Image (spheres, rainbow, N blue to C red):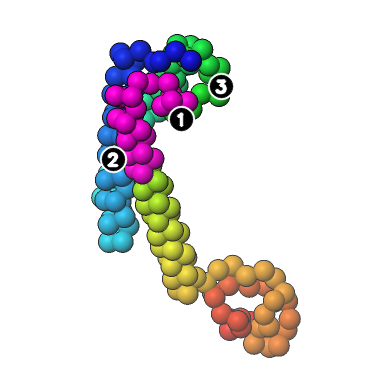
Amino acid sequence: MNPLPQPLCIQLRDHLDAEIGVHRRLLASSEAKTAEIVAHNIPAFTQLLQREQAPVAEMARLRQLRERLMRQVASNLGVKADGLTMSIILTAVQEAMRGDLRRRQQDLTAVIAALRDINQRNMVLIQQSLSFVRAMLHGLVGEKLPKGHPYDRRGLLGASLHGNGRLLNLRG
């Protein structure tokens, strides 16, 4: 393997910096969303979701650029583009750039892991909130019950009910 040219290493380093920056913006947005979910501030949560669209689009654009850059690196290294990883690139770069690239790779991995964790937590908070709302609505208005389950007040089984969340049909 030929060592990776310095300008390509600098381009890769700058690209990783850009990806780290976008992921950090998304992480800050996800942390703000957590606070709004807990406060049950739906309008603010919706605004955060809308503002998050630009960094998500930027992340997709950067991913495409990274794939192109990785193919270029693969062609310079004489490696198949399919099996190219950052580990292979790190073994091919000059020693001076290896530490910078490895540090950026670790930073990116850490930020992505933190983003995944907070998004998972937000998902659980939203699910719990929806479950609570569903339980409250069921307690207040009930739900449509299938035919044949409860007895009506005359003791008839299979009365037609339009459920009010109660075991007995008191209208019966």
Name the residue tied to disc 3. Answer: 82
> Badge 3: few (under 14), some or many (20 or more) residues near its Cα, within 10 Å?
few
Q: Residue at x 33, y 24 (%)?
A: 95
Identify residue type, mark 3: Asp
Q: Does residue 48 lie above or below 17 as drawn?
A: below
Residue 86: x and y in percent read 44, 28
Tell me which residue sits at (41%, 27%) in the image.
Answer: 90
Residue with the mark numbered 1 = 87
The residue that mark 2 highlights is 24
In this rendering, position of residue 56 left or right of residue 170? left
Q: Which of marks 3 and 2 is nearer the N terminus?
A: 2
Residue 128 position, x and y percent, is: 44, 63
Q: Give, as a three-letter code, the residue at label 2.
A: Arg
* Labels 1 and 2: the sequence-earlier one: 2
In-front residue for pair 31/165:
31
In front: label 1 or label 2: 1
Q: Is residue 56 above or below residue 146?
A: above
Q: Which circle, 1 or 3, is nearer the viewer?
A: 1
Q: In this view, does 11 lie to the left or right of 166?
A: left
